[in-house]
Amino acid sequence: MPPPPEADEADQQTRTHPAWRRIKLDELLAQQLSLRRAYLARRRKGAPALVSDGKLAERLLAALPFGLTGAQIRVAAEIRRDLNQTHPMQRLLQGDVGSGKTIVAALAVCQAIEAGHQAAFMAPTEILAGQHLLKLKTWLEPLGVKIVWLTGSLKKTAKRVSREQVAGVAQLIVGTHALIQENVDFSRLGLVVVDEQHRFGVAQRLSLRRKGEAMPPHQLMMSATPIPRTLSMTYYADLDISVLDELPPGRRPIQTRLVSEQRRDEVIHRVREAVSGGRQAYWVCPLIEESEKLQLQTALDTYSVLSEELGGLRVGLVHGRLGTEEKETTMALFSAGEIDVLVATTVIEVGVDVPNATLMIIEHAERFGLAQLHQLRGRVGRGARDSVCVLLYQMPLSAMARQRLKIIYENSDGFEIALQDLKLRGPGEFIGSRQSGVPLLRYADLEADADLVELTRTLAEKMLRETPERAGQHLERWLGSREEMLCV
């Protein structure tokens, strides 16, 4: 019932009056009930038990030039237990930039293959999918694993051959959203790995899950954007979550520098110094073509200017509108050290691993989000040398841009950055594509009402167990038909 007329106005403005607290509790309870019910419903579905003796994974680990961290060993064991079950795994693997998610996913792939099933590895962009393909081929092809590449940009004949192999001999299929097209038929899909899962919409994630023939496949979703605890307890409560909270040894801290556009010449000099010392650099720009509205320096213009200002150095260019072969060729040249400075858009945000690149310049850093800045910064610091990330900004700065730059300058821990990002933007923007499947909270505040989140989690489990009909009535009142696309 509403607050009485004599209720303190300040309590109503701050939504701390008991009546407001009750509304927020009811809203959070509806969310928890819906997510928990979806979680339990999934566990009642059948899935292939991917039981294996682990020999393939052992051979992979023996061939690696590095050992696993304690966190990787722990998380790999959690996933292995899930894959042994006869209900579909729905696990989110989150870890900071460079924490080693791909090798953990590769171990899960080994288990699926050894159990006689196929694995699919899907990434949102061709560059990221290509990086995964390169790593997975290096690790798994020497072990005899048949890997197939499938993206939308393949020529007609090559695409037809790939689809035939997917329907037949392929053991691991790596690609983009082309994997979920209607004319792609898997022969025995048992495991789906989705990298940067928040970049795929609800319908896309549903399509991939439905690619399993008689049973839904196990699903491992990966994200390099750490999820704050209150968010994982609410919007991701339908998933089991594994966290890689330990970086591999040898990862050096990255120095972050804030530099005004007026000191651009100094930055150019810094790039020359890095290259003369045998290192390489990234120069990242936010747009491909000129935008009069935003007046941002473009990748094309920057490439032209830097090629002139850095005369004598080898400058390359990569952006999303290049053809796949051209992008791959440029990235291969950069990886091989045959390009000194790579001018790029955010297509290199994730997945790119060049240990000799120790300098990252981010142009118009004030225009980027915190997650993007942290991801881009993580492209350096992958070798034995000290690395620097220069955030080149243009005045005047908005209050929000100033806050973002301050946060990224002061913090290197992805979880702390994610927490600050959540406070700045709220859950709707933070969770990206998933919000199209999850009703956003209208009344409750994840930070201010954290105690209610804890309470409603417990209450939801009790209601579903003891009074499921009351739980259904509560959900109908709060969500109605919106529950259908939830929890994907």
Image (spheres, grey):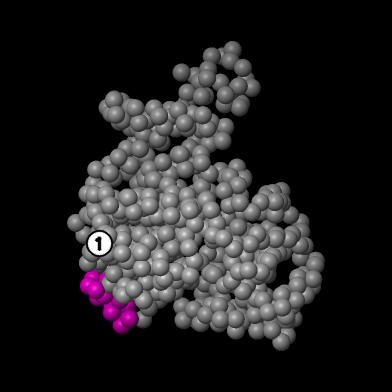
Q: Can residue 287 be seen in this view?
A: no
Q: Identify which residue, 173 or 211, lies in the foreground.
A: 173
Toward the left, the furthest residue is 214
Above or below, 284 against 326 in this view is above
Residue at the spot 49% in from the left edge and 79% down from the top edge: 328
Find residue 242 and report its horizontal and vertical position in percent.
44, 49
Element type where label 1 sits in the image = loop
| Range covered by the magenta-colored residues | 156-169
Asked whether residue 249 appears in the rendered view, the answer is yes
Hey, what amino acid is under mark 1?
Answer: Ala
Residue 180 vs residue 44, the one in the foreground:
44
Report the residue at 46% width, 39% height from top. 233
Q: Indicate the position of residue 250 as horizontal and vertical percent values.
A: 59, 63
**Residue name at image x 32 percent, y 37 percent:** 37
Q: Which residue is drawn at 61% across and 26% down?
A: 13
In terms of image quadrants, where is residue 273?
Answer: bottom right
Give the quarter of the image for residue 27: top left
Please indicate whether residue 87 sits to the left or right of residue 96 in the image.
left
Report the front residue among 428 and 314. Answer: 314
Residue to which mark 1 is pinned = 115
The x and y percentages for residue 376 are: 60, 63
Instruction: Reply yes or no: does residue 33 show up in magenta.
Output: no
Q: Vertical placement of 236 versus 265: above or below?
A: above
Q: Is residue 160 magenta?
A: yes
